[in-house]
Amino acid sequence: MKILSEFREFISRGSVIDLAVGVIIGAAFNKIVSSLVDQVIMPPVGVVMGGVDFAQLKIVLKAANTAAKSPEVAIQYGAFINTLIQFLIIGVTVFLMVKMVNAIRRLTAQQEHDAAPSAPDATQALLVEIRDLLKASAGSPPAAAAGHQKGSTSTKRS
């Protein structure tokens, strides 16, 4: 029973669920891209290339023998070209998505940085402290300041 509860805890974690959703969406996206390449992009490219169907391009190494019931052995480079184009489309799409997410993260971080008040550096903190001390001593007679003046002979005695 402990294994079952550990498995339930593992599977209910957010990261595992997110990963599963990502894999499912990725598989669906792969089907869309495959259809785009095979049915939309490659037919016009084949027409431009002289009516070539890329899916059928191959180098036959050994022809099929119906009498011996041996299948054809061929290098299907046309299918490889289709797969390569699919990979490039998916790669560019993922790159653009990651770039967009990073831009949003940078913008959010910049807005948070701009919204947060910046802490004063050491010089500013010292100047603020001096200002506050001067304001506090402005209401009382400057006893300490009188001792620093040259030629000052007036002192109060009680």
Image (cartoon, helix red, strand yellow):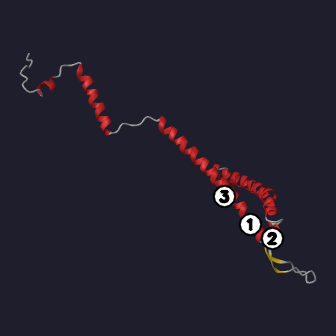
Q: Residue tagged by mark 3?
A: 91
Label 2 neighbourhood size at 10 Å, few (<14), some (14-19), many (20+)? Answer: some
- Residue 38 x, y percent position in the rendering: 80, 60
| Residue at image coords 76%, 54% | 28
Query: Along the polypeptide, which appears first: circle 3 or circle 1?
Result: 1
Label 3 neighbourhood size at 10 Å, few (<14), some (14-19), many (20+)? Answer: few
Q: Secondary structure at mark 3?
A: helix
User: How far apart in space, not on screen, are marks 1 and 2 (Cα)?
Assistant: 9 Å
- Residue 59 x, y percent position in the rendering: 79, 76
Label 1 neighbourhood size at 10 Å, few (<14), some (14-19), many (20+)? Answer: some
In the displayed structure image, the side of residue 96 where residue 155 appears, left or right: left
Q: Residue tagged by mark 1?
A: 81
In the displayed structure image, the side of residue 147 where residue 65 appears, left or right: right
Q: Secondary structure at mark 2?
A: loop
In the displayed structure, 45 sits above or below 110; it is below
The reply to whether dot 1 and dot 2 touch (C-beta < 8 Å) is yes
Location of the N terminus by quadrant is: bottom right
Farthest residue toward the right? 67
- Residue 128 x, y percent position in the rendering: 31, 31
Q: Residue tagged by mark 2?
A: 57
